[in-house]
Amino acid sequence: MLGEVLPAALALTVGFTVTLLLIPQVSGFMRRHGILGVDVHKPERPLIPEMCGVALVLGVTASSIFIGILRSDYLLKVVAFTASTLIVAVVGALDRLMKLGPRLKPLLTAFGAIPILILAAYNPHPSLPFIGGVRLTIIYPLLIPVAVAVTANAVNMLDVYNGSMSGTCTVAVLSVIICMFINGSVEAAGLAAGLLGGLLSFHIYNRYPARIFAGDVGSLYVGAAIGVLAIFGRVEVAAVTALMPHIMNAFYGLAAVGRLYERREISARPVVVLPDGRLDASSDRRAPVTLARMILAGGPLKEYEVTARMVTLSAVSAGLAVATQLLISWC
């Protein structure tokens, strides 16, 4: 048992430590070079260093490389995970610099699946509740690019409030790791632990009041990493359950607007900032429906209260994910 848990514990430590050490350096670099984002949910609209997700990317990548050195039998998945997620991180960086657009960005994130497909780092026999293992030899590889793009962009769309992405994804990844151990997917759990460590460090700086923003490079990376790890760990259904708040937020937004869109394209914001700093749901019918807008339907809240409710929803989804994986293991 110790031999199974130790790599994950070490990966978590490396991911946490490297990310924590890099954040001040990366945020300082971004501020000096004017790579800043407006914190639109505060009356004073402060400028916050953006693209600081680079620190998270480097920290998790360092953790993955460490795992590959520690356990040579993990090497295939380490290479596939690192290559796939770095491709998506580059897409996020390009979006910040070039404004890729709402159609091109999801398409490019799907290219993160290429290393997984080339290295055949997947098992086309997922397990489903009440059914057990199913054979999807032809269909499964076709679904991998979709899975990477969906998880990457769903997480990206919830990265709007201080700590919302880092807080909800920390809870989701923790539940996914538990599901991996239930499933006996020790290799994937080790890689996921590095991601968990990086998210814990990042949340320290990203929580309310945020001192850094992840930017697309960070949020797309985290979402893609969760999707890739779910494939490696054969916990696809549990991961979808854990990410349900992110998927709901993306679905309602897309359904309301009727097309793929970027936040910067929406003139009617779903949430308005009141003079006292609280957030309230917009009454503008043109505004897209989002998870935050639904949370605020009951009345105005502070930004950190909105994030706390998102994290609570993620915790509920995480519990359901673990229950789902237990159900699958009994089938």
Image (cartoon, helix red, strand yellow):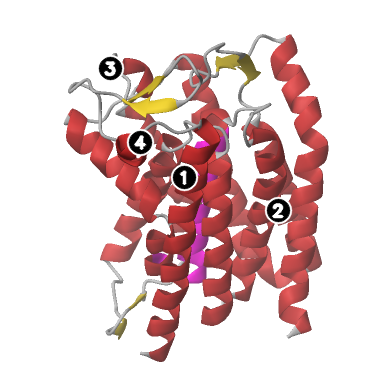
Task: Nearest to the eye among marks 2 and 3: give it.
Answer: 3
Q: What residue would you read off at disc 1?
A: 112
Say what amino acid the circle numbered 4 marks.
Answer: Leu
The one nearer the camera, 171 or 240, is 171
Does residue 248 appear in the picture of this structure?
yes
Res 163 quadrant in image:
top right
Q: Secondary structure at mark 3?
A: loop
Give the Cα distance between marks 2 and 3.
37 Å
Give whichever of discs 2 and 3 has the lower sequence position: 2
Give whichever of discs 4 and 2 has the lower sequence position: 2
Give the Cα distance between marks 4 and 3.
16 Å
How many discs mark residues in the rendered view? 4
Say what amino acid the circle numbered 3 marks.
Answer: Ala
Q: Is residue 270 left or right of residue 5?
A: left
Q: Position of residue 109 (x, y in %)?
A: 42, 39
Q: What residue would you read off at disc 3?
A: 268
Sort mark 1 into few (<14), some (14-19) or many (20+) by Cα contacts within 10 Å: many
Q: Secondary structure at mark 2?
A: helix
The one nearer the camera, 215 or 40, is 40
Give whichever of discs 1 and 2 has the lower sequence position: 1
